[in-house]
Image (tube, rainbow, N blue to C red):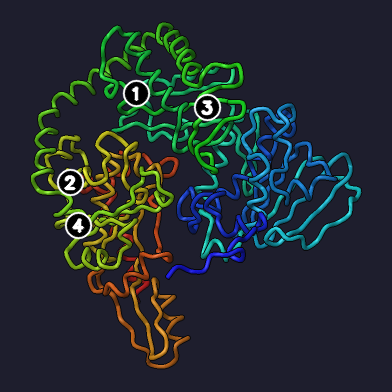
């Protein structure tokens, strides 16, 4: 029988209650900090965005960002929030200066929402404005004022300082990863030449914008010098590398649109069209764009994004009287890229050679690809290898960012995960034994090797990352020598042929407990020796201790705890200076004296620790 539906069923929430009840509407997914798009990084970004908007308006050339433990502090030297409106600006929804197009043109910050979301989702939130020799300070907890000081005199320079401690009730067991924050800071300076950001004492500044961005993110040199073009409200940079696939960085008003949008689609289209016309050859666009690494930044008045977190541009117009985003980008690239290639014939020759080589390789693989697709159908992919889930990364569903696929080895391990998974959002792919070491092989092996062919088909990444079916690709192997080897072989496969999967932050290692410590009243699962010792001490004398040797030893009833809301994932990250070729050659190439020395040295360390 349906529950009683009456006047008492209708509730009106305060704005802060709504944000805390539905945080995903404001900051996307929550997470614990292990992924770069987790909510705690969005909180940092919302605060810094406001400081960036000050710089964009010509006020303040330095921003100081400090992250200590879980405390975040951002100090800018802009104009400072008008003191009489400090409380309104930080705690009243739909209040802000960005509705005033003269005060903030082409701003990145949200119109009166962003900083309030940070306030509502913080245990402690402090904001202080310095303006013309005066200052005002307010301290909140979960958007409720704890302390409000009167306006006072100050010798501090103009600007705003925000400090916050994210609420552990909302962000359970969260932690900041320095590399993610550093990448965010670098993007800010790449997009705002002349801006200095001091992050935890380290200064970051860029003089060449997107040129520096590509240089920072490339693993090795490009096949030709970076093409760097700038115009009013638009900047692009591009080259080709030696990797498979395409790699793009797109921005709107300084916002990193990680999911692209109309501007990125136009960029890709314009590059293909311009190159075809320049060489007067009807190249396949996939041959033109394979191995490209490119970046585009545009400025749009009143942009329309497809989500609250502004990761995908939906705008079609540049402004009330301006051209469409597509036409604006197409016109700029058609003219400027064509001019560049005419002025730089050596670069044009290298680019042509790359396209022709890619075309030759694609045609050589055409027959193999066709046979591989047929073979994938014959082995009945969905029944034999993949236990699929219902919600996928590219579906228009509110849970799309939670979709995951576990890649595991062996019937017992895959069986445990399959029985304990969430069938809506979690899929399982079963490997049969150890995969092939694919280092040094051509992409032809992806189609000739059944395991790789089926895995590629399951992820739906043959044509690139655009149609990736799962947001989280999780390697779930035993924590022993064989399990570690399988991890390396899978990572080699991804880095060799689909590096964008790793660069985009989609690949993780599943952490499962090594020990179970329990008595009659309580059970503790321990991931380290330290946690085991602590559990033994807490649970009293003679608890039962189990050492899990493999995933298959963990029952489905227990496994559900390790892949549910408390799942522990270790992200696989590439840092600056991590040349994919160098890393794979060292770890997966032929035995070298350097690798032998590394193994021997670390083996001795481990023996010492055991003793």
Alpha carbon separation for disc pair 3 and 2: 37 Å
* Residue 75: % across, % down: 71, 45
Quarter of the image where the C terminus is located: bottom left
Please report whichever mark, 4 or 3, sits nearer to the chain's N-terminal start. 3
Query: Residue 223, which numbered label?
Result: 1
Closest to the camera, between mark 1 and mark 4, is 4
Crowd band around label 1 with a 10 angstrom C-alpha radius: few (<14), some (14–19), many (20+): some
Crowd band around label 2 with a 10 angstrom C-alpha radius: few (<14), some (14–19), many (20+): many
The residue to which callout 4 is attached is: 430
Judged left or right of residue 500, residue 14 is: right
Alpha carbon separation for disc pair 4 and 3: 41 Å
Judged left or right of residue 394, residue 369 is: left
Point 18% across, 45% down: residue: 452
Please report whichever mark, 1 or 3, sits nearer to the chain's N-terminal start. 1
Closest to the camera, between mark 1 and mark 3, is 3
Q: Nearer the viewer, residue 7 or 269?
A: 7
Crowd band around label 3 with a 10 angstrom C-alpha radius: few (<14), some (14–19), many (20+): many
Alpha carbon separation for disc pair 1 and 4: 38 Å
Query: Residue 454, which numbered label?
Result: 2
Quarter of the image where the N terminus is located: bottom left
Point 64% across, 43% down: residue: 48
The residue to which callout 3 is attached is: 297
The answer to which image quadrant residue 569 occupies is bottom left
The answer to which image quadrant residue 106 occupies is top right
Please report whichever mark, 4 or 2, sits nearer to the chain's N-terminal start. 4
Query: Residue 561, which numbered label?
Result: none
Alpha carbon separation for disc pair 1 and 3: 23 Å
* Residue 265: % across, % down: 41, 26
Alpha carbon separation for disc pair 1 and 2: 32 Å
Q: Nearer the viewer, residue 347 or 465?
A: 465
Please report whichever mark, 3 or 2, sits nearer to the chain's N-terminal start. 3
């Amino acid at each position: 029988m349906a529950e009683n539906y009456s006047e008492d069923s209708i509730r009106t929430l305060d704005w802060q209650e709504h944000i805390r009840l539905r945080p995903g509407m404001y900051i996307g997914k929550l997470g614990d900090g292990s992924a770069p798009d987790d909510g705690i990084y969005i909180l940092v970004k919302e605060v810094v965005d406001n400081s960036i908007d000050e710089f964009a308006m010509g006020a303040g050339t330095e921003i100081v960002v400090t992250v200590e433990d879980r405390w975040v502090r951002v100090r800018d030297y802009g104009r400072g929030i008008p003191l009489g409106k400090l409380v309104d600006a930080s705690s009243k929804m739909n209040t802000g200066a960005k509705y005033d197009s003269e005060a903030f043109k082409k701003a990145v910050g949200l119109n009166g929402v962003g900083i309030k979301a940070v306030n509502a989702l913080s245990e402690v939130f402090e904001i202080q404005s310095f303006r013309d020799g005066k200052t005002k300070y307010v301290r909140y907890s979960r958007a409720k004022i704890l302390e409000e000081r009167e306006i006072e005199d100050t010798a501090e320079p103009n600007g705003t300082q925000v400090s916050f401690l994210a609420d552990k009730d909302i962000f359970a067991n969260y932690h900041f990863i320095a590399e993610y924050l550093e990448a965010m800071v670098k993007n800010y300076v790449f997009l705002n030449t002349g801006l200095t950001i001091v992050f935890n004492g380290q200064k970051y500044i860029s003089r060449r914008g997107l040129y520096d961005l590509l240089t920072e993110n490339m693993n090795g040199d490009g096949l030709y010098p970076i093409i760097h073009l700038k115009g009013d409200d638009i900047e692009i940079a591009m080259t080709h590398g030696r990797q498979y696939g395409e790699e793009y960085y797109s921005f709107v008003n300084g916002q990193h649109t990680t999911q692209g949008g109309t501007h990125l689609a136009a960029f890709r289209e314009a590059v293909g069209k311009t190159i075809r016309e320049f060489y007067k050859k009807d190249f396949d666009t996939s041959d033109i764009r394979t191995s490209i690494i490119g970046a585009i930044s545009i400025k749009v008045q009143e942009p329309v994004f497809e989500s609250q977190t502004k990761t995908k541009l939906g705008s079609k117009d540049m402004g009330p009287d301006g051209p469409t985003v597509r036409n604006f980008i197409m016109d700029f690239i058609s003219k400027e890229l064509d001019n560049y290639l005419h002025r730089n014939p050596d670069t044009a020759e290298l680019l042509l050679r790359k396209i022709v080589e890619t075309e030759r390789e694609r045609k050589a693989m055409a027959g193999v690809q066709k046979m591989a697709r047929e073979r994938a159908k014959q082995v009945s992919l969905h029944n034999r290898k993949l236990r699929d889930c219902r919600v996928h990364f590219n579906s228009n569903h509110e849970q799309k960012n939670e979709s995951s696929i576990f890649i595991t080895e062996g019937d017992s391990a895959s069986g445990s995960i399959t029985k304990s998974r969430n069938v809506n959002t979690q899929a399982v792919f079963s490997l049969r034994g150890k995969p092939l070491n694919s280092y040094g092989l051509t992409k032809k092996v992806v189609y000739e090797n059944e395991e790789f062919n089926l895995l590629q088909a399951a992820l739906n990444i043959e044509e690139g990352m655009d149609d990736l079916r799962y947001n989280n690709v999780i390697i779930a192997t035993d924590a022993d020598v064989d399990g570690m080897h399988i991890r390396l072989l899978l990572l080699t496969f991804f880095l060799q042929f689909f590096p964008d999967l790793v660069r985009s932050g989609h690949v993780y290692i599943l952490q499962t407990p090594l020990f179970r410590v329990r008595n009659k009243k309580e059970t503790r699962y321990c991931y380290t020796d330290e946690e085991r010792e602590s559990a033994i001490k807490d649970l009293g004398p003679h608890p039962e201790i189990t050492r899990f040797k493999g995933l298959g030893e963990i029952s489905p009833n227990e496994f559900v705890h390790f892949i549910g809301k408390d799942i522990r994932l270790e992200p696989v990250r590439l840092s600056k200076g991590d040349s994919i070729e160098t890393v794979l050659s060292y770890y997966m190439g032929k035995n070298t004296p350097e690798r032998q020395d590394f193994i021997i040295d670390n083996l001795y360390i481990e023996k010492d620790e055991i003793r």
